[in-house]
Image: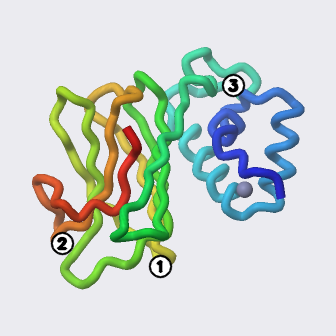
Amino acid sequence: MNEHPHDSLPAFALGALDADEASQVIEHVSACPTCRDDAEVWGAVVALLPYSTPLHDPPAHLTAPETVGKPLAPTSLAPGARGKMYMRLGGRQAMLLVAGLPQPEAGKTYQCWFASPPHQTWAVTLNLDRDGAARLFLDVREPLDKSTQVMVTLEPSGGSSKPSSAVVLAAQR
Ligand SMILES: [Zn+2]
């Protein structure tokens, strides 16, 4: 199988790929459940956008170059975990995908933290599915940019007001 077209999926969902690129994505997605899931999520994201986008002619501010995927790398606490946050630079909407997280022990929960200095850090708790994956749609308080930091920590149930040292996933700076 070809390399997963992760970076093309947002543009695909927006109808912003040319015919060749789109047919490559369709070919891959039809054989790859992971990317099919991602494509469905992106379709849902696009449907939620407050612009009703004609698929053949997306507005310039929604096309692929402004949509970035920020990978999250695991620490030794969850070596099999991975994650990616998709966001539109300058926008306030993002989607976080995580997978491969071990189920938290009783009394613990995963919490995802965002920081765009100098603005305050804020956080949401993550509900994992049975496979250790979670998807989160976010409306963030400050416009996202390349310096927006993201990490996932393990916290007491209900979440914490500041991150502990138990970082399981973090975006590279
Ligand atoms: Zn794939």
Quarter holding ligand 1: bottom right
Q: Is residue 80 above or below residue 64?
A: below
Examine the image and state in which quarter residue 107 appears: bottom left
Please state the horizontal and vertical placement of residue 49, each as a whole percent of the image.
Answer: 51, 33
Kind of residue indicated by mark 1? Arg
**Of the two numbered discs 3 and 1 in the rendering, the one whose residue sits closer to the viewer:** 1
Measured in 3D between alpha carbons, the distance from the residue under mark 2 to the one under mark 3, in whole angstroms, is: 43 Å
To which residue does mark 3 refer? 54
Q: Which quadrant would the N terminus be assigned to in this image? A: bottom right
N-terminal-most mark, 2 or 1 = 1
Q: Secondary structure at mark 2?
A: loop
Q: Is residue 70 above or below residue 143?
A: below
Q: Which quadrant would the C terminus be assigned to in this image? A: top left
Q: Is mark 1 within 8 Å of ligand 1?
A: no
Q: Secondary structure at mark 1?
A: loop
Q: Residue at x 43, y 39 (%)?
A: 94
N-terminal-most mark, 2 or 3 = 3
Other residues around mark 1 within 10 Å, as few (<14) / some (14–19) / many (≥20) = few
Q: Nearer the viewer, residue 47 or 85?
A: 85
To which residue does mark 2 refer? 157
- Judged from this view, the residue extending furthest toward the left is 161
Please state the horizontal and vertical placement of residue 165, each as a whole percent of the image.
Answer: 18, 60
To which residue does mark 1 refer? 130
Q: Secondary structure at mark 3?
A: loop
Q: Residue at x 62, y 17 (%)?
A: 59
Please state the horizontal and vertical placement of residue 134, each as a whole percent of the image.
Answer: 45, 63
Q: Are circles 2 and 3 on residues that touch, CB within 8 Å? A: no
Q: Is residue 96 above or below residue 109?
A: above
Other residues around mark 3 within 10 Å, as few (<14) / some (14–19) / many (≥20) = few
- Judged from this view, the residue extending furthest toward the top is 60
